[in-house]
Image (cartoon, helix red, strand yellow):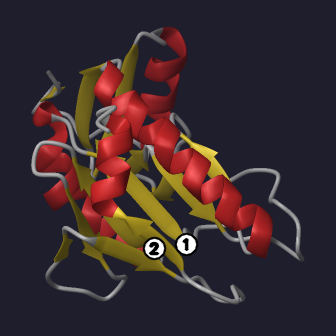
Amino acid sequence: MAMPAVHDKRWTALEVQAMQDADPHHRYQVVDGELLMSPGPRRLHQKCVVELVGILREYLDAWDVGDLLAGPGEVIPDEYTGMQPDVFVIPLVDGEPPEDWDTNGRLLLAIEVLSPGTARFDRVKKRPKYQSMGAVYWIVDCDARVVEEWLPSGAQPMIQAERVEWRPDGAGESLVLDIPAFFRKVFRER
């Protein structure tokens, strides 16, 4: 179960990076100075991540509009925030993947697979940070079998139960994720 760690200290992203380096068995993230520590993800969470990476890899190979990364990989929108999206796409720089994803300050797509202990952080704390970086933000809820889709300037999510689409600049067509088919594959249902 994830939990905020120390309530009376305002952590910086650099301090949290040092903690992560010293303790690779836990995930440390910080949003607006609030530290979140969580154990490694469970199998279902990772199954969702693997399926999403496969879908996005195929799409990005076809359209070459961004660089796909899977967590843990830290994005740092400000001094007091360092987040590790489960899956994310960053823009290319002069047609090439950037050397360091921390330095470009933009995200095209950020995806979090919801875990019971991180729901508040994913929905309330991280969301505006991802949006401030220009990202379309998906929260994948395995229990409800939906995707919460947040646009960069959106004040409310669009709850998608059938399909979610994403079309970054430069792509000739949208990525269409068939949500029921995605969850059937994750849960190994026929």
Q: Earlier in the sequence, mark 2 or mark 1?
A: 1
Residue sitting at x 17%, y 58%: 123
User: Is 142 situated above or below 149?
Assistant: above
User: Is 13 situated above or below 144?
Assistant: above
- Residue 59's image quarter? bottom right
* Place of residue 119 in the rendered image (x, y in percent of width and height, measured from the top left): 13, 45
Identity of the residue furthest to the front in this view? 190
The residue tagged with tag 2: helix, strand or loop?
A: loop
User: Is 84 situated above or below 153?
Assistant: above
* Place of residue 158 in the rendered image (x, y in percent of width and height, measured from the top left): 19, 79
- Please name whichever residue, 13 or 135, is drawn nearer the observer in this view of the structure: 135
Q: Tell me the quarter of the image containing the C terminus.
A: top left
Q: Is residue 70 visible?
A: yes
Amino acid bearing label 2? Ala
The residue tagged with tag 1: helix, strand or loop?
A: loop
Q: Are marks 2 and 1 in contact (CB under 8 Å)?
A: yes
Q: Which residue is mark 1?
A: 108
Q: Is residue 11 left or right of residue 143?
A: right
Amino acid bearing label 1? Leu
> Which numbered dot is residue 170?
none
- Residue 139's image quarter? bottom left
How crowded pointer 1 is (Cα within 10 Å; few <14, some 14-19, many 20+) is rated as many
Q: Is residue 169 left or right of residue 97?
A: left
How crowded pointer 2 is (Cα within 10 Å; few <14, some 14-19, many 20+) is rated as many
Residue sitting at x 30%, y 28%: 44
Q: Is residue 180 left or right of residue 88?
A: left
- Please name whichever residue, 89 or 188, is drawn nearer the observer in this view of the structure: 188
Q: Which residue is mark 2?
A: 135
Residue sitting at x 56%, y 47%: 53
